[in-house]
Amino acid sequence: MTNHWVDIKNANIIVVMGGNSAEAHPVGFRWVIEAKTRNKAKLIVIDPRFTRTASVADHYAPIRTGTDITFLSGVIRYLLETGKYNKEYTLAYTNAALLVNPDFQFSEGLFSGYDEATRKYDKATWSYQLDEKGFARRDATLQDPRCVLNLLKAHVARYTPEMVERICGTPKETFLMVCEHLAGTAAPDRTTSFLYALGWTQHSIGSQNIRTMAMVQLLLGNMGMAGGGVNALRGHSNIQGLTDIGLLSTSLPGYLTLPSEKEADLAAHLAKNTSKPLADGQMNYWQNYPKFFVSLMKSFWGDNASSGNNWGYDWLPKWDKGYDVLQYFEMMNQGKVNGYICQGFNPVASFPNKNKIVASLSRLKFLVIIDPLVTDTSTFWKNHGEQNDVKTEQIQTEVFRLPTTCFAEEDGAIINSGRWLQWHWKGADAPGEAIADVEILAGIFAKLKALYAKEGGAYPEPIMKLAWAYANPMAPKPEELAKEMNGKALADLADPKEPGKFLARKGELLPGFALLQADGSTSSGCWIFTGSWTQAGNQMARRDNTDTGFGNTPAWAWAWPANRRILYNRASARPDGTPWDPARQLIKWNGEKWVGIDVPDYKLDEPPGSAMAPFIMQAEGLGRLFALDKMAEGPFPEHYEPFESPIGTNPLHPKVVSNPAARVFKGDLADMGKADAFPYAATTYRLTEHFHYWTKNVRLNAILQPEQFVEIGEALAKEKGINHGDMVKVSSKRGYIKAKAVVTKRIKPLTVDGKTVHHVGIPIHWGYEGVAKKGFIANTLTPFVGDANTQTPEFKSFLVNVEKL
Ligand SMILES: Nc1nc2c(c(=O)[nH]1)N[C@H]1C(S)=C(S)[C@@H](COP(=O)(O)OP(=O)(O)OC[C@H]3O[C@@H](n4cnc5c(=O)[nH]c(N)nc54)[C@H](O)[C@@H]3O)O[C@H]1N2
Ligand SMILES: Nc1nc2c(c(=O)[nH]1)N[C@H]1C(S)=C(S)[C@@H](COP(=O)(O)OP(=O)(O)OC[C@H]3O[C@@H](n4cnc5c(=O)[nH]c(N)nc54)[C@H](O)[C@@H]3O)O[C@H]1N2
Ligand SMILES: [Mo]
């Protein structure tokens, strides 16, 4: 979230699109209700199903799965055509006026630079026109046909209300009603908050769904505002934290980049990642990349890292390609992987194409499961009847189960969707032989290190040089790890402004990332966490809920970065420093510096009226309506059909149906179904009464949702002769499940491209392990393809057939 949970109450319009927060985030949803009751906010839900969130909404719009880019591009078109957008904000704070490379093009579904053989783009033309100094050219009059705004207008011109209805199945009048509500928040004193989760991410075009919404928010002037923002409601405790410390296989903690093979040495890596300003006088925070990176190296390798050995750069792995989970299971399936350590992950249940996952695990020599529970993955080799029909005698994989604690059985920080690091204390000791994950990993590390010391090996340095300065090396404490993440001074840091004074003395915990250095005199395991555990103590454990305004509680826990609660908050004021909305002023200029109820997201002493733009994580300081080369499939969002499409064509450009830049493995392409055999659009989701695949181990939850079911609309049920409670078989090209049919009014057929499209809803929570009534694994049905940028699987749009049993 750019904003935070409590801030939702400040919104005037709340759009839940690509999520179902009343069910998946029932506690946080109180802030939506708060906005409705105290702020007279209107709640709009846009979902293929009439969800429990929809049941308390003011307006509901149905939409076909996988078509949100069309809907939101239609909104952008509406805003631009009617002129109902915040023009002053758009001109000053977005790249609307910047000029784009003359060779950039879009035609028949493809942007310039596409290579069909590799399914990748050469992104050279996805750039600005630069002047002699290397700064982006601009036309503040917005007359130049090559300025971003004019190119955007031309790009979205095709997304008429008629086209939205044709692709999304959303009635035109409903769509226009949503447009009007959103347009109302282009006013400086009104904001929209968008809440989303998996209904947007789990698509082959997931990242672009979110980008399109971010563009709407920029045009409306809602970024940086209380009650505005781009708000991802996260999943697991502690998935936000996992992302922050480097979830992706090509990233390092704090969204730093793991070097690729092409970056042969440190200088090449730093040159590639240290951003150069694209506008005169612009501060852009990634210019500090070397400080964050070298401090991370000092945290990894300790005294072993020195300027003489490039801070241990050679000991880092260098990637040739991304090793996301789809890639990894594909390699496993090809017999290229010997062993797999599976920690807090149940891929047989949670990953797409269950039969492929089981086949892949069957090719391993060994599998290590680190989990408090017996999972479906840990017994994948057992025949569980129709629900896991394997031949045990043919599976040679040796499985080790290491029982671990769960999050409630240890101390530590959990980071919520609003980026707050909240320290928590363990509720109980773990039962039986279970020990903490950290102890298990420390044990594996100690054993590996001893083996390398004794036997040598191809490349022992990365293990032998690792810093491991914990009081008990076999059991590092959460406090020790938290302080390591925060970072400390490795030498006295002199204050450049006041001779004789020090910003920090050697050995002290650092108060903020501004003190990090590129010369090896500081260490930090995750620069965005610097400030979370300082000389003043554990900031994450603070529990003072004093409200400084708009539900802002700066002394409750600690938010990254720098305890800032609303990102880009400089944009809450006009360029001249006056607030867009005096009734929700976040920061103001006091004559010397920026101050306010939130930590300013800007250079503190940069006066109003200066040329420095507010989006200081960008090289030009502007919110990007044109994404340059940051996205895999294009600088503007474009509608592509799901890989399994119920209409089998793209009404905008029949030659390019699905995401041309998505990676699809050969075998999986052959496993994609077509609408003739699998006519219904299926989507998967969670229920309030269950948490993934854990709660089938809990009797109470098993009683609340006693049996696996699928949801179908009344029209489809009638067509198929299915009654409420009948057993049905739901099949895709990859397999089938059997479940009870819930026949509901909440899923209505949509008319799409002249055809009737029915949705089938499939909750995810069943499997063959646990105390609940056994069920089929929903992911037996789902396709093995992911978003082109993140490789998040397309769990939300695929094709099935339904038969009465
Ligand atoms: N009780 C409970 N709470 C949970 C979890 C749980 O298992 N149980 N899991 C947690 C986790 S890890 C996560 S990530 C979050 C997920 O939170 P959500 O994403 O809110 O959860 P889902 O149930 O997957 O809801 C997705 C919604 O998107 C809709 N949808 C599907 N396709 C589309 C589409 O193309 N466009 C639009 N606009 N909507 C679409 C679905 O109909 C569904 O209502 O929930 C968390 N909270
Ligand atoms: N079809 C479909 N598939 C989906 C989704 C969907 O919407 N549709 N949603 C996806 C999403 S958003 C998610 S997050 C995934 C979830 O997928 P998984 O993460 O694979 O599923 P969980 O059941 O949450 O499994 C986590 C495991 O962690 C264990 N665990 C809990 N605490 C600890 C701990 O402290 N240490 C260790 N080592 N283990 C622990 C639990 O016992 C559990 O077995 O599923 C994904 N799969
Ligand atoms: Mo999740």
Image (spheres, grey):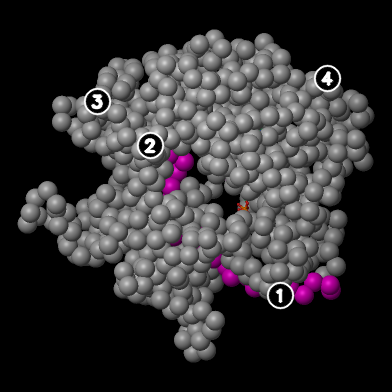
Quadrant of the rendered image containing residue 680: top right
The residue beneath circle 2 is 132
Q: Is residue 28 visible?
A: no
Q: Which numbered mark, 4 or 3, is in the foreground of this view?
A: 3
Q: Earlier in the sequence, mark 3 or mark 2?
A: 2
SS for callout 3: loop
Compared to 274, does 378 lie above or below?
Answer: below
Range of magenta residues: 393-418
Q: Given the image, on which type of amino acid does mark 2 rest?
A: Glu
Q: Nearer the viewer, mark 1 or mark 2?
A: 2
Judging by the rendered image, the residue that carries numbered circle 3 is: 608
Q: For the residue labelled by badge 2, is the local secondary structure a helix, a strand or a loop?
A: loop
Q: Which three-letter amino acid code belongs to the residue tagged 1? A: Lys
**Residue at numbered disc 1:** 365
Q: Is residue 584 magenta?
A: no
Q: Is residue 260 left or right of residue 133?
A: right
Q: CA distance from mark 1 to mark 4?
A: 52 Å
Q: Is residue 527 left or right of residue 207?
A: left
> Mark 3 or 1 closer to N-term?
1
